[in-house]
């Protein structure tokens, strides 16, 4: 079975002390993960080293950055490169979250470059995609999200794309409490897997983990994760609560 992943996206939340305390509380549960299960904490840049230290030695627990530069290196004040993140042991980076696409104008082309930089450095990109509400209301979501994959991932080789984790996050479900229905999530993720199969072959598509994100909670995680094409979740608000995120981890398919 492909990897089942519970990924926490803390976004720009928590003080250092709160972040350290949350990790201590979560890790103290000593949740045993099955060989195909992973937990990833996507934490703000200043907390990466601390988080790495706390998950050290815990099998299948990882720390991710929430972004990276689309430049390899150089005079880009304030930016952080993939290679700098890799050099401190960061092996996963969230790429193209809808908040970065919206607030920082990250295009599919820029995101393709970021994916390339991740793969060149041996870092796993967690590639985010998803439609805004008007697209959903127009019922053109499949074409919209398919285009995001086509423009950012379809230049990859079979070997490269097999290393990508995808997170489908309908923008209208992010932070709203209005979770996509289980059917809506499954329909889209099944469509994305078919699109990937048509391009890269069924075996490769079947091996790619596709997460759902958008108001995942302890109360809905079991139902959402049970769908055949949902391989876990990328979780915002609920990941800031130890009890919530513990339940979400425990909802992963084995
Ligand atoms: O953006 C998200 C995760 O990346 C989802 O956020 P919420 O879980 O708060 O809806």
Image (spheres, grey):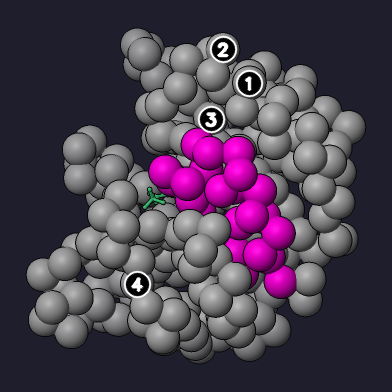
Mark 3 surroundings within 10 Å by alpha-carbon count, few (fewer than 14), some (14 through 19), many (20 or more): many
Counting residues from the N terminus, which is met first, the one under dot 4 or under dot 2?
A: 2
Instruction: Tell me the residue that label 2 is attached to.
Output: 17
Residue 232 among magenta residues: yes
Instruction: Tell me the residue that label 3 is attached to.
Output: 43
Instruction: Tell me the residue that label 1 is attached to.
Output: 21
Counting residues from the N terminus, which is met first, the one under dot 3 or under dot 4?
A: 3
Counting residues from the N terminus, which is met first, the one under dot 1 or under dot 3?
A: 1
The part of the image, by quadrant, that contains residue 50 is: top right
CA gap, disc 4 to disc 2?
Answer: 33 Å
Q: Image check: 104 left or right of 251?
A: left
CA gap, disc 1 to disc 4?
Answer: 31 Å
At x 37% / y 47%, what residue is drawn?
97
At x 49% / y 67%, what residue is drawn?
220
Q: Position of residue 49 (x, y in %)?
A: 66, 17
Q: Nearer the viewer, mark 1 or mark 4?
A: 1
Instruction: Tell me the residue that label 4 is attached to.
Output: 180
């Amino acid at each position: 079975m492909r990897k089942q992943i519970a990924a926490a996206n803390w976004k720009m939340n928590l003080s250092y002390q709160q972040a350290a305390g949350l990790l201590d509380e979560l890790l103290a549960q000593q949740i045993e993960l099955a060989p195909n299960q992973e937990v990833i904490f996507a934490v703000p840049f200043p907390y990466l080293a601390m988080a790495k230290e706390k998950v050290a030695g815990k099998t299948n627990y990882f720390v991710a950055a929430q972004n990276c530069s689309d430049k390899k290196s150089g005079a880009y004040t304030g930016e952080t490169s993939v290679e700098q993140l890799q050099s401190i042991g960061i092996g996963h980076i969230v790429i193209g979250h809808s908040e970065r696409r919206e607030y920082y104008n990250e295009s599919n082309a820029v995101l393709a470059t970021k994916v390339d930089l991740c793969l060149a450095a041996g870092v796993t990109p967690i590639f985010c995609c998803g439609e805004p509400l008007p697209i959903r209301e127009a019922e053109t979501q499949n074409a919209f999200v398919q285009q995001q994959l086509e423009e950012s991932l379809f230049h990859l080789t079979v070997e490269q794309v097999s290393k990508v984790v995808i997170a489908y996050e309908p923008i209208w479900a992010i932070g709203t409490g209005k979770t996509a229905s289980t059917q809506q999530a499954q329909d889209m993720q099944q469509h994305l897997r078919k699109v990937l199969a048509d391009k890269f072959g069924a075996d490769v598509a079947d091996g790619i983990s596709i997460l759902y994100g958008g108001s995942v909670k302890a109360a809905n995680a079991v139902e959402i994760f049970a769908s055949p094409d949902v391989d876990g979740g990328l979780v915002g608000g609920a990941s800031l609560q130890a009890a919530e995120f513990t339940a979400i981890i425990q909802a992963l398919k084995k």
